[in-house]
Amino acid sequence: MESSYTTGNWNEKKNKLKEKFGYLFDNDLLFDEGKKEEMLLKLQLKLGKTREELIRIIETL
């Protein structure tokens, strides 16, 4: 997530995250410009992952 994702690319990753973690919803994965950190924090809390773990998961999708 350190690099900027296009909306299309994020939509693909978002769908893969929802497949991997069935308890994630669209609201959990809203990627608004300038709110990346807020989204990452919400995902960290919901998934119980560190920021680094979460970024690694997203980048490998």
Image (spheres, rainbow, N blue to C red):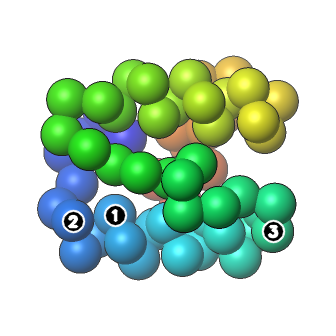
> Residue at 34% of width from left, 49% of height from top?
31
- Pointers 2 and 1 in contact (CB under 8 A)? yes
Q: Real-space Cα distance between discs 2 and 1?
A: 5 Å
Q: Is residue 35 left or right of residue 57?
A: left
> Residue at 39% of width from left, 24% of height from top?
37
Residue type, numbered disc 3: Gly
State the SS at label 3: loop
- Pointers 3 and 2 in contact (CB under 8 A)? no
> Residue at 22% of width from left, 54% of height from top?
5
The quadrant in which residue 10 appears is bottom left
Tag on residue 19?
none
Dot placed on the residue nearer the N-terminal end, 3 or 1: 1
Residue type, numbered disc 1: Trp
Q: Is residue 26 left or right of residue 35?
A: right
Q: What residue would you read off at disc 1?
A: 10
Q: What residue would you read off at disc 3?
A: 22
Across and down, in percent, residue 35 comes to 30, 30
Up the image or down, 17 lies above or below 3; here it is: below
The quadrant in which residue 54 appears is top right
Q: Residue furthest front?
A: 27
State the SS at label 2: helix
Dot placed on the residue nearer the N-terminal end, 3 or 2: 2
Q: What residue would you read off at disc 2?
A: 7
Q: Nearer the viewer, residue 59 or 5?
A: 5
